[in-house]
Amino acid sequence: MPFLDILQLSLRNLREAKLRATLTTMGVIVGVAVIVTMVSFGLGLQRNTVERFKALDLFNELTVYGQSVANLAMSRSGGNQNTNRVDENGRRQRPLLPNSKPATRILDEAAVAEIETIPGVVYVEPVIVFTPFVRSNGRVFTELVAGASVPNESSRFKEFAAGSMISSSDAAEVVVTEQWTQSFGYEKPADALGKTLEFLAPPEKKKDEREEEKDSGASFFGIPLDEEESGEDAGKDALVARSFRIVGVLKEQKGQQGGGFRGLTANASIFVSLKAARDWTTEYRNPMTEVALELARSQGAIDEKQAEGFVSATVRVTDPVVLTNVRTRLTELGFQSFSIMDQLEQLRTVFLIINATLGLLGGISLLVASFGIANTMIMSILERTREIGIMKAIGAEDGEIRLIFFVEAAVIGFVGGVIGVLTAWGIDGLSNRLAYRYILKPQNASYVDFFYIPSYLWLGAIAFAVLVSIIAALYPASRAARIDPVKALRHD
Amino acid sequence: MSTQVEHSNLHPSALSSHPLIGAREVAKIYRMGQTEVAALDHVSMGVDEGEFVAIQGTSGSGKSTLLNLLGGLDRPTSGEVIFDGRSLAPFSKKEMARYRRRSVGMIFQGFNLIMTMTAVENVRLALAFGGLRGRERDARAEELLARVGLEGRLDHRPAELSGGEQQRVSIARALANRPRVLLADEPTGNLDSTRAHEILGLLRAMVDRDRLTVIMVTHDQELAASFADRIIFMKDGKIIERNAEVRSN
């Protein structure tokens, strides 16, 4: 008998006992709805947690540390090679991480370029931070300035209160935080746009440095732009070393007063292009660094042309999945690295347990439903004994009779599964709305989707419902197939 | 009753002359607790192609049991059923189902139609088990019902049909997959005399015209005598009188 006819027969049987079929299906609907609602809540919880971390760029960024010039200089002059953890000048450059070997290489431009070739790395953003006197709108404060890659994927540069990101790495442009505009007396973030921001430096130092740099032929950090601007400014103020145009004001994150911690990059209030930052730090080098550099050079630890390198760099990867591979490669290259991901592996295990527990609770309700299916099937067989006898008398095979009942059960499972998934989806939507209205909104929080129904969840739930239904029909169906036609036809 | 001539080819030893369907030394024993009841006690018989044979006997004589064995609905305790020279004994369950589907058709006293299906759906069901599908199946179902004179009642459910009409539907269904033998278990038991004559007239016509073979179990002497070629009398699981040639034409 063609399967289509079997299906037709099964559907007809269900139609003939509408109420019973409906009630049985209800059991499956409840079971599936409970499973999907519970698991989707667990998954939603997981997604929301992970997304929050992701938004902070904790999963797709890692920090790489190189050998510092200070260490090089000291180790060569008799210091202990492997004691950089107790090194006073090491400061926070070297977090005390277990299992991480100390870096053996200097993190310079060449190293950055090499790291960028590792598969999965989007870009490497050396951490260049300095604290110059900054003047804008007639006020002067010392501010923390950081270099940023241009263009930049980091979520820090996703939302602007006004303006946009620095247009190119050569542009004399800066991005500031919303808070910075307030402390510098701009009423609205937009007011700061187009305004000038100046970094101040000692006049004579500035001059000397420039000459020195030119003499030593360190051409790779000279910007023609810089000369122009400083030339203009020289007439006004001898202290002005560099002047920038404000092109963007970063939006302050809710609940993160004071800038907030985003990703692994420094928490500065002013961002310039990496190139500009590098220029500045080379030109106005910290005296301590200069001493270290000189020491290292004179000892031959680094050659004359080699610069001191970066303390650390932020490595952005395409996907959290490749993070481990990238870190392995970094270790091979002789760098130390740090990622918050290590600490979050535990979190995944926790969610696995939560989801399994929620799924189990739902599974129990589907188990209860499966007894209902078995019961319905047995009742239906008792009722249709004569009909089964007739079918056998006119030539139905045992297998065909069995299949009719399996298909009947599968239809109950499928319909129950589909409606169950839709019910769960409805419950999720309703819960979200209620939670927003009565819990989130009164606290001024924004709408949160607490549930997550990925396609594997709803497809899996329907498949599971069908499977459970077929298992429940195993005994009834084989009992139907075993019916003796002679007795069945005598049956009234 | 009047003429009782020993018919040579129905003797067990004479089965070599190839009756279409028959039984050889068939016994069927039912176990009721401790006691065993022999519904059939080593019965042998045979029916030729194109014959209309009535099996007559009181209730409990074993005539229905014999018919069920011939129809492949049941298996004998010992002995064998033979169809077209082949024994059914080694048949698997699946082969038995195939035999019921293709080789024989059955009709019953209670019609045994599926009450929730219309006339044409009942016939189509049998055709579906026979593997026929689509348009071909619909056409054949209508043709079969037309053959039994029900072309105007295709979409009626059994409850909307008279007893005679219901039995016609069941005949159409029994003949769906072109069996060579029609087994009828008290086909007129629930019908009045006029309807009974109509139904048996229909079967008789099919025997005469299409060389259909009919074996009918009945307790009605008059009907058996008027329509069957010969009658087999049974009592207590044994054939007590066979080959009663009753029909002159």
Image (cartoon, coloured by chain):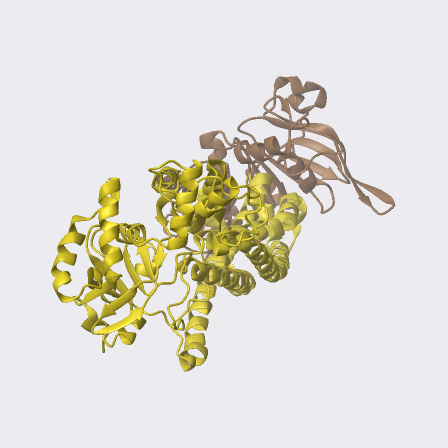
Q: Position of residue A83 (x, y in %)?
A: 58, 46
Is residue A75 toward the left or the right of residue A210 in the image?
right
Is residue A205 toward the left or the right of residue A228 in the image?
right
Q: Is residue A476 above or below residue B214?
A: below
Is residue A167 toward the left or the right of residue A288 in the image?
left
Q: Residue at x 37, y 55 (%)?
A: A286
Q: Quadrant of residue B148?
A: top left
Answer whether residue A10 is visible to the viewer in this image: yes
Answer whether residue B172 is visible to the viewer in this image: no
Q: How many marks?
A: 0
Q: Position of residue A300 (x, y in %)?
A: 43, 35
Rendered shade, chain B: brown
Say which chain is yellow.
Answer: A
Instruction: Return the residue nearer the eye: A362 or B121.
Output: A362
Q: Position of residue A388 (x, y in %)?
A: 59, 48
Instruction: Return the residue nearer the eye: A328 or B63.
Output: A328
Instruction: Return the residue nearer the eye: A215 or A41.
Output: A215
Q: Residue at x 49, y 61 (%)?
A: A40
Is residue A265 toward the left or the right of residue B222 in the image?
left
Which residue reaches farthest top? Answer: B16
Q: Is residue B125 above or below residue A129?
A: above
Q: Quadrant of residue A80?
A: top right
Q: Quadrant of the N terminus of chain B?
A: top right
Q: Residue at x 74, y 34 (%)?
A: B240
Q: Is residue A120 above or below residue A61?
A: above
Instruction: Return the residue nearer the eye: B149 or A340.
Output: A340
